[in-house]
Image (cartoon, coloured by chain):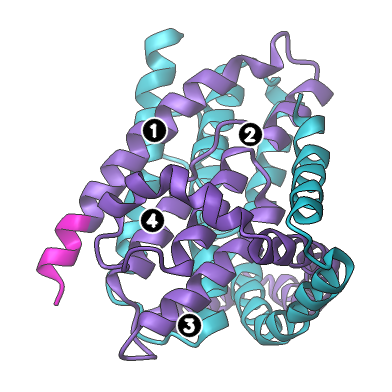
Amino acid sequence: MSNYIMPLIVLFVIIFGFIKKVPIYDTFVEGAKESFDLVFKLFPCLLAMILSINIFVKSNIVTNLFSFVSFIPNELIPLIIMRPISGTSSLAILTNIYQTLGPDSLAGILGSYIQGSTDTTFYILTLYFGSIGIKKIRYSLWAGLLADLFSIIISILFVYLIF
Amino acid sequence: MVNKIWGCFIIIGILYCLLNKNIEIVNNAILDSTKTSFDMIIKIFPVMALWLGIAKIAEVSGLLKKLSCKISTLLKYIFPEIPKNHESLSYISSNIIANMFGLGNAATPFGLKAMQSLQELNKKKDTATRSMITFLVLNTSGVTIMPTTIISLRMMYGSVDPTSIVLPCIIITFLSTLLGLMIDRILARFYV
């Protein structure tokens, strides 16, 4: 099912452009050119973010400090902490849970919920605000993190409802 | 804010490694970051170019405007500050649509374009506007309908029912997005 979505979107856009007599090739190239600008602005932000996250995560402080919380499986603590910071590393943690405990275990299901219903707040924040040069982000970090927290709490409540 | 968090992550990480005499880990983490970020940007670049190309066709042909009309009635309530028919609304709706289908790669270029056009409405160019933050909350609470990556991962590791998580995820996302938007409203009122 999800295999069909991307080709269908492309097909739909191209056909629509055809009907409206848009010079589709020229327009595509023109749009693709804009990516240069974005990527050059993006790289410094990305490097800075990855540098600090790498140091923080690899130091293992997260796993060592939060090993005392008991109402959720211990394996999920690093996932919860990493989820708003880095999408790839939280996905790596989830994969590890699938591998060791199985995708249908309590940790596996709860992990799927959390990964599926939240997004990488810090990444989106740096990316979106970095690309347009916003420096004063006001309350956006709190709003983003609270939205994440809600997703996690509702996920935990939900999993205990059906398990 | 970003400055403080960024610094704290680095300071805490390095100090913790120093205390545990694990200085080799920090060395690797620093060296790795250049490689990882380069790999990421190289991966993002062509995907971005591709979707920005497609998006341009959708924009020039008027498709984006048409699509955004469909959900703009809803967006009007969520983004009261954006003037009617402003182009940012169509980018926001495209971003939401791409996110719903778990197409994170397609959603990001639309999101960046949305931010750019929201910036045109911004009077203080270095300060985030209310609409920007609301848009951010919509993105971070993750309006997903088909979490495609998770489903394929669950298949890979032999789940009995890989798609069993879809409906719960939709319910959780819906509730948390609603709560997130409420919090956004409340914070906007207190934070001047």
Is label 3 on the same chain as label 2? yes
Q: Earlier in the sequence, mark 1 or mark 3?
A: 3
State whether residue A64 appears in this view. no
User: What's the mark number on residue B137?
Assistant: 4
Q: Nearer the viewer, residue B28 or A7?
A: A7
Q: Reading the chain from its start, which is encountered first: label 3 or label 2?
A: 3
Disc 4: which chain?
B
In the picture of the structure, the residue carrying the numbered disc 1 is B174
Residue at which label 3 appears = B7
Mark 1 chain: B
Q: Disc 4 marks which amino acid?
A: Val
Q: Which residue is drawn at 73% across and 24% down?
A: B154
The amino acid type found where label 1 is placed reads: Phe
Q: Name the residue under label 2.
A: B147
Labels 1 and 3 within one chain: yes
The span shown in magenta is B185-192
Kindly indicate which chain is depicted in cyan in the rendered structure.
A
Q: In this view, does A87 lie to the left or right of B90?
A: right
